[in-house]
Image: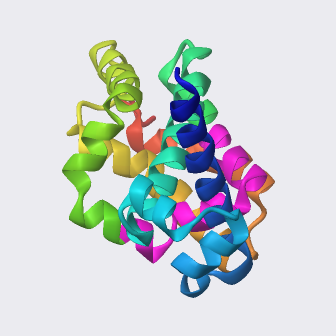
C-alpha cells in the first residue's frame, strides 16, 4: 500500500469514527457534514472525496458495523453442534453485541437503517454476502438434518431475529428490558417456533 493509500485509509477511519461519535452524542439530527468535519479534523473536501455525501458516510458506517455484527453471529454459530445450541449462541451473541455497543446498536436499529434496508436491500445483501452465506448454509444444514422445520428461509430468519430485534429496540428505547434475562429466556422460546419437532 502506498503512503497516499495509507493516508486515505486513515482519513476514512477518522471520518467513520467521528460520525459514530457525533451520532452517539447528538443523535441523527446532529449528524451533519459540519459536525463530522469538526469532530474529525478532516476537511469537507475529503469527506466528499471518500463518501460523496453525509448520507454516503452514514451508509458506510452502517455497513461497517452490520458486517461486524454478522461476523460475530457467524463466529457464535461455528462453535455449535446442534440447531438448538446454535439458536442459543446466536441470540446471546446478538444481545451481547448490543450491550457492548449501545451507540452502534442505536444506529443499526434506527429509522435511518430501516430506510437503507428498505430502499437498498439488494445492495446490502450483496455487500454482506460473504457474511450471510454461512448463516444460510447453517440453516439449510439443520433443515436437512431434520432439526429445523422446513420453512422458507426468510420466515426462519424472521422467527429467529424478530424477537431479538424487538427486544433490542425496546431496551434501546425504554431500557425496561433486562438483556441478561432476555438472553436466558428467548433462545428456548425461539427454538420452539423453529424446531421440526415442537414437542
State which quadrant residue 76 falls in.
Answer: top right
Q: Main secondary structure of the magenta part?
A: helix
Q: Nearer the viewer, residue 186 or 64?
A: 64
Q: Nearer the viewer, residue 103 or 61?
A: 61
Taking the magenta stretch, the answer to whether it contains residue 106 is yes
**What's the residue at 53%, 34% (across, down)?**
4
Looking at the image, can residue 58 be seen?
A: no
Q: Nearer the viewer, residue 187 or 77?
A: 77
* Relative image position of residue 128 (x, y in whole percent): 36, 37
Q: Going by the image, does 44 lie left or right of 40?
A: left
Looking at the image, can residue 167 be seen?
A: yes
**What's the residue at 67%, 40% (across, down)?**
92
Q: Going by the image, does 142 lie left or right of 21?
A: left
State which quadrant residue 99 falls in.
Answer: bottom right
**What's the residue at 58%, 69% (across, down)?**
169
The region drawn magenta spans: 91-114
**Image vertical order of residue 185 relative to residue 23, above or below:** above
* Relative image position of residue 160 (x, y in whole percent): 45, 45
* Relative image position of residue 47 (x, y in whole percent): 49, 62
**What's the residue at 23%, 48% (across, down)?**
123
Q: The C terminus appears in which quarter of the rendering?
A: top left
* Relative image position of residue 161 (x, y in whole percent): 46, 50
Amino acid at each position: 500500500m502506498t503512503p497516499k493509500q495509507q493516508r486515505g485509509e486513515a482519513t476514512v477511519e477518522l471520518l467513520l469514527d467521528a460520525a459514530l461519535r457525533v451520532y452517539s452524542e447528538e443523535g441523527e439530527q446532529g449528524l451533519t457534514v459540519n459536525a463530522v468535519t469538526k469532530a474529525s479534523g478532516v476537511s469537507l473536501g475529503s469527506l466528499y472525496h471518500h463518501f460523496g455525501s453525509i448520507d454516503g458516510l452514514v451508509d458506510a458506517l452502517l455497513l461497517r458495523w452490520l458486517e461486524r455484527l454478522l461476523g460475530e453471529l457467524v463466529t457464535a454459530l461455528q462453535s455449535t453442534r446442534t440447531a438448538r445450541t446454535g439458536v442459543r449462541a446466536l441470540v446471546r451473541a446478538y444481545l451481547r453485541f448490543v450491550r457492548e455497543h449501545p451507540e452502534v446498536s442505536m444506529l443499526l436499529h434506527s429509522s435511518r437503517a430501516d430506510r437503507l434496508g428498505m430502499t437498498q436491500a439488494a445492495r446490502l445483501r450483496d455487500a454482506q454476502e460473504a457474511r450471510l452465506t454461512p448463516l444460510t448454509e447453517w440453516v439449510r444444514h439443520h433443515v436437512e438434518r431434520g432439526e429445523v422445520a422446513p420453512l422458507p428461509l426468510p420466515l426462519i430468519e424472521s422467527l429467529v431475529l424478530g424477537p431479538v430485534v424487538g427486544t433490542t429496540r425496546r431496551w434501546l428505547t425504554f431500557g425496561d428490558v433486562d438483556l441478561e434475562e432476555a438472553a436466558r429466556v428467548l433462545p428456548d422460546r425461539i427454538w420452539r417456533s423453529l424446531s421440526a419437532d415442537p414437542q
